[in-house]
């Protein structure tokens, strides 16, 4: 069974979302700390990012924030995280998210979260990133995205195999299980990247 020592969590900065998303984020944070997993995230102090960081810290876990310098005032960087990395731009931030992690966890979010997830699966399709990518589909939040991916397969923009690049879970308590049950992936994926 794969050790899960370090993960990146893609999550949002909005503090106006339904409480169920905060509750799910708290469960995932506690589960990761109980597993002695270091958490990497976008560095924000509010919204789901803030809940993730606050919970990890309250549970005596280790969390690393990564944010471009210019976003300090937009997403209000969390001043209490154990380690903070400021990057030159968004591209470097997303690259740093993937350094040394054992998995990527995508929570419900907005365009930034969508974009991070899509870049990750694009890199996985090319065999550049090979670690598990899991998607929390809480109360069907990501159903439209999953339908779009299936439509891409039906129209030959993706192959059936590409649907194995991510694993979907619905209960936040199952985050580690979702990672462990992800389809193994290798750099050889570039050989079937073309449909």
Image (cartoon, grey):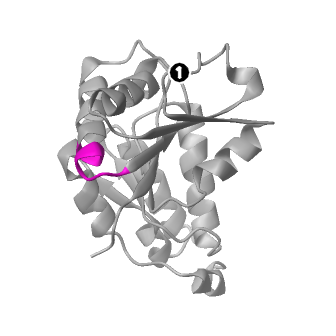
Q: Is residue 58 above or below residue 141?
A: above
Left or right, 170 with respect to 143, comes to: left
Q: Is residue 35 magenta?
A: yes
Q: Quadrant of the N terminus?
A: bottom left
In depth, the one of 180 and 195 nearer the eye is: 180
**Residue 55, position as x, y percentages in the image:** 31, 28
Q: What are the residue bounds of the magenta stretch?
A: 31-37
In depth, the one of 28 and 182 nearer the eye is: 28
Quadrant hosting residue 52: top left
Q: Is residue 29 magenta?
A: no
Quadrant hosting residue 166: bottom left
- Circle 1 residues within 10 Å: few <14, some 14–19, many ≥20: some
Q: Disc 1 on helix, strand or loop?
A: loop
Q: Residue at x 41, y 78 (%)?
A: 184
Asked whether the viewer can see residue 147, the reply is no
Quadrant hosting residue 98: bottom right
Q: Is residue 19 above or below residue 124?
A: above
Q: Residue at x 65, y 73 (%)?
A: 126
Say which residue label 1 marks: 78
**Residue 130, position as x, y percentages in the image:** 53, 71
**Residue 113, position as x, y percentages in the image:** 53, 38
Left or right, 11 with respect to 167, comes to: right
Q: Is residue 128 above or below residue 137?
A: below
């Amino acid at each position: 069974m794969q050790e899960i020592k370090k993960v990146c969590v893609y999550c949002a900065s909005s503090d106006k979302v339904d409480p169920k998303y905060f509750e799910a984020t708290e469960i995932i944070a506690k589960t990761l700390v109980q597993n002695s997993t270091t958490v990497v995230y976008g560095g924000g102090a509010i919204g789901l990012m803030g809940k993730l960081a606050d919970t990890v810290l309250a549970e005596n876990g280790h969390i690393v924030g990564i944010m471009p310098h210019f976003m300090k005032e937009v997403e209000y960087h969390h001043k209490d995280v154990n380690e903070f990395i400021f990057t030159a731009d968004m591209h470097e931030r997303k690259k740093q998210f993937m350094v040394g992690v054992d998995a990527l966890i995508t929570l419900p979010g907005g365009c930034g979260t969508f974009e991070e997830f899509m870049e990750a699966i694009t890199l996985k399709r090319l065999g550049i990133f090979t670690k598990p990518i899991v998607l929390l589909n809480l109360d069907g939040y990501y159903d439209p995205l999953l339908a779009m991916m299936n439509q891409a397969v039906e129209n030959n923009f993706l192959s059936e195999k590409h649907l194995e690049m991510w694993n979907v879970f619905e209960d936040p308590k199952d985050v580690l299980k979702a990672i462990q049950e992800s389809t193994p992936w290798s750099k050889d994926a570039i050989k079937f990247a073309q449909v």
